[in-house]
Amino acid sequence: MPDQAAPLAAPMLSVRGLKVAYGGIQAVKGVDLQVDQGELVALIGANGAGKTTTLKAITAGVATQAGDITFMGRSLRGQQASALVSQGLVMVPEGRGVFGRMTITENLMMGAYSRRGAPDVGHDIERMFAIFPRLSERAAQLAGTLSGGEQQMLAMARALMGHPRLLLLDEPSMGLSPIMVEKIFEVIRSVSAQGTTLLLVEQNAKLALQAAHRCYVMDSGVISMSGPAQDMLHDPRVREAYLGEAPG
């Protein structure tokens, strides 16, 4: 079980009463959640539950109907997505979104765009290559020619180049081989242990719960359950609904 991080007096991220609609469809129906400094918090649920929409709302990727989102004690209302990166709020989206016509090294440099001119960017690239040796072997290769797993590694490394205070990961294991999934989660656990705060949306509920400190379960646009991840890993309702176990 991960060591529980000591929280700040106020949460790093606070979401209260969040509502998001697409046309006439209410995708998020009043979500409350928080992430404390140093935590790895998982958000799990079925497809279409509203998990990705919640992350997009936090990072100004979609408009919100109602609610408030605060980061480091400041409201994010009205802020542009580009401004959030410089504040330390970084998201790795589902689908990775690497720059396919740029090399791995160029992608990493783009991840440090908000820190342009900083003297330690080169050192950070070497650190990413140490974390992801496969990227180091292909440093001059175009990102668009990488495998799905390699692109996921690159997307995570590029995000870490921005020195995020809070890293949001949307379905990092989607479409990857079992071996690559384990590698990605090894990195997630390592990044968390080194002090980066994470909010993780993940279909592989078992791996997410094993890695996380706390977990929220989302169902049809609302939070239906929440609690310590280890408790939820053994909760019969979670095991039946999300871990594929028959009711006992």
Image (cartoon, grey):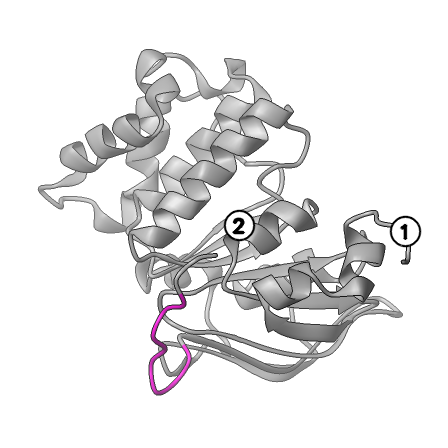
Say which quarter of the image contains residue 200: bottom right
User: Along the polypeptide, which appears first: circle 1 or circle 2?
Assistant: 2
**Residue 85 in the image, given as x and y percentages of width and height:** 37, 57
The amino acid on which the numbered mark 1 sits, given as a three-letter code, is Ala
Residue closer to the observer: 145 or 208? 208
Identity of the residue furthest to the front in this view: 248
Residue 10 lies in the magenta stretch: yes
Crowding near pointer 1: few (<14 within 10 Å), some, many (20+)? few
* Residue range of the region highlighted in magenta in the rendering: 4-11
The Cα atoms of the two marked residues, 1 and 2, are separated by 29 Å
Residue that carries the numbered disc 2 in the rendered image: 169
Residue 226 lies in the magenta stretch: no
Helix, strand or loop at mark 1? loop
Residue at x 43%, y 30% (from the top left corner): 154
Residue 68 is at least partly visible in this image: yes
Identity of the residue furthest to the left in this view: 119
Residue at x 49%, y 64% (from the top left corner): 213
Asked whether, in this view, residue 106 is left or right of residue 11, the answer is left
| Secondary structure mostly seen in the magenta stretch | loop
Residue 246: mark: 1
Q: Is residue 226 above or below residue 191?
A: below
**Residue 81 in the image, given as x and y percentages of width and height:** 47, 60
Q: Is residue 134 above or below residue 98?
A: above
Quarter of the image where the C terminus is located: bottom right
Crowding near pointer 2: few (<14 within 10 Å), some, many (20+)? many
